[in-house]
Amino acid sequence: MNIGKGSQTGGGNPGHESRQPQDQPGDVEALLVARSRRGDTAAFNQLILMYQQAVYTLTYRMIGDSETAADVTQEALFAAFRGIASFRGGSFRAWLLRIASNACYDYWRRSRRRPSESLEALTEPGEGYDEGLAQQFAGDERWNPETLALRTELQELIQSGLERLPLEQRVSVILSDIQGLSYEEIASVTSASLGTVKSRIARGRAQLRDYLQRHAELLPRSYRLREEKGREPGR
Amino acid sequence: MNHPEHAWEQQREQLSALLDNELSAQERAALEAHLEDCSQCRLELESLRRTRALLHALPQPALPRSFTLPLKPAAPARQVPDAQQAPVPSAAQRSTGLQMSRTSALRRPVQVLQWLSAIAAVLGIVILLSGVFSTLHVGGSTANSALSGTLNQGDKSGSAAGSQSPTHSPNANTPSTAGADEGTPAPTPPTPTFTPPSSTPGAGFGQHTSGGSSSSLSEHIFSTTSVGLFLLLLSVCGFVISWALRRRW
């Protein structure tokens, strides 16, 4: 059985960051941070160029709307520049992503799109764990990442499922499975313990899986037919 | 094997963490041994793995715009590189950084040049105005020769001539006039009572002109005006050069 991240294929985007820490240009980053502390906007803009994709990906996957995500990203980066004196070292990326996730929370509080949604709410009514769904999902070749091509409809379905996760689970799943952060980094971003991060990621994945299995029929018929054909030779 | 409901959440956390290599070696070995016998956990692990793979396969959203912050007005916006560059700083970005630091290093001399130009402009205007004052005094300042004589003596002593020395230097005949008034060839130190602080260069020039020839007067006015104009020209040049340098960056 293939387990672990090393076995994962799924057509991962080459632009995604790997979970293993890369050789960061730490000295360059530290220099830019130091200059930014002295109010050097040009230096901070260099940091923005390094991390704007990560910040925007987080806000976009959290919110689901490109315009709003862009506004929240800009707001977060302004806030980061204003508050860079409070950065006490460590991972600058984690610090920046924490500001971005807080900006997303602020957006949700302001917009009150889901007033009944609690940050710690576990699942929506009627969407609890369903063992049958997990079995279907695991046994259904349509969901086999090795044979899947992420067409627009499927991307929208995944995004829609993400937006139904409670915020804390959502941010943890995005940071882990889309951004490739380690549990330790996610704990730093979300100010939570490692155990809490582990729990949120597991619950978020399970809930998203159940959502996808429930809504598989929303995918266009042509898509499903294509997938049916695609798996023929494999059987 | 069926897991009881209360233990299932914890078991799923372990399976999920196994996918992320976030288990200790001991936990991992125990879980993998358990997976050999438990079909429920195998199904759960496979479904979580697929979910994780689907999320990982999502494409990165395209940036709708650059999120770089606006620079201060003194620095041109073209210093900000294009938004669509790679998130990791490329060689091009590093060279841009070098260019920026070079720009900020050159900004200081330009500021110094601007200050010098401003000072030259002020000095030039003051000197030009003093020349205008001296021409105004040519006709009518013949009164109070005794007081003027003492003023001349105070000026000649040199201690008060700091800021006025450029305008006094052309007057070569001043000592003889003062000597004739006082009758003592040796210069005496100025007394505070005879050197009022309100004495202006204009008053001194008026006295000089009353005692000197018309040719030396016109020569003096000409030199004062030319010095003033020269300083003004210098300041204009300084401003133009600094403006051009800023435009180039």
Image (tube, rainbow, N blue to C red):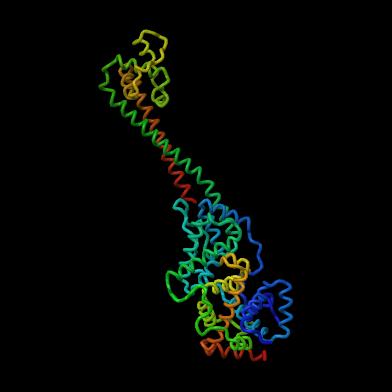
Q: Is residue B234 above or below residue B140?
A: below
Q: Quadrant of residue B26?
A: bottom right
Indicate left or right for A124 with A199 as reference: left
Percent from the top left, x then y, of residue B186? 42, 10
Q: Is residue B169 above or below residue B85?
A: above
What residue is drawn where x is 67% and y is 89%?
A234
What residue is drawn where x is 67% and y is 83%?
B41
Percent from the top left, x then y, of residue A124? 50, 81
Q: Nearer the viewer, residue A120 or A155?
A: A120
Can residue A15 be spotted in the picture?
Answer: no
Q: Quadrant of residue A228?
A: bottom right
Q: Nearer the viewer, residue B153 or B44?
A: B44
> How many numbered discs sit on the rendered protein?
0
Indicate left or right for B101 with B127 as reference: right
What residue is drawn where x is 60% and y is 55%?
A30
| Quadrant that contains the N terminus of chain B | bottom right
Q: Nearer the viewer, residue A191 or B95?
A: A191
Can residue A99 be spotted in the picture?
Answer: yes
What residue is drawn where x is 52% and y is 58%?
A45
Percent from the top left, x then y, of residue B181? 34, 11
Residue found farthest to the top:
B183
Q: Nearer the viewer, residue B163 or A214?
A: A214
Percent from the top left, x then y, of residue A23? 66, 62
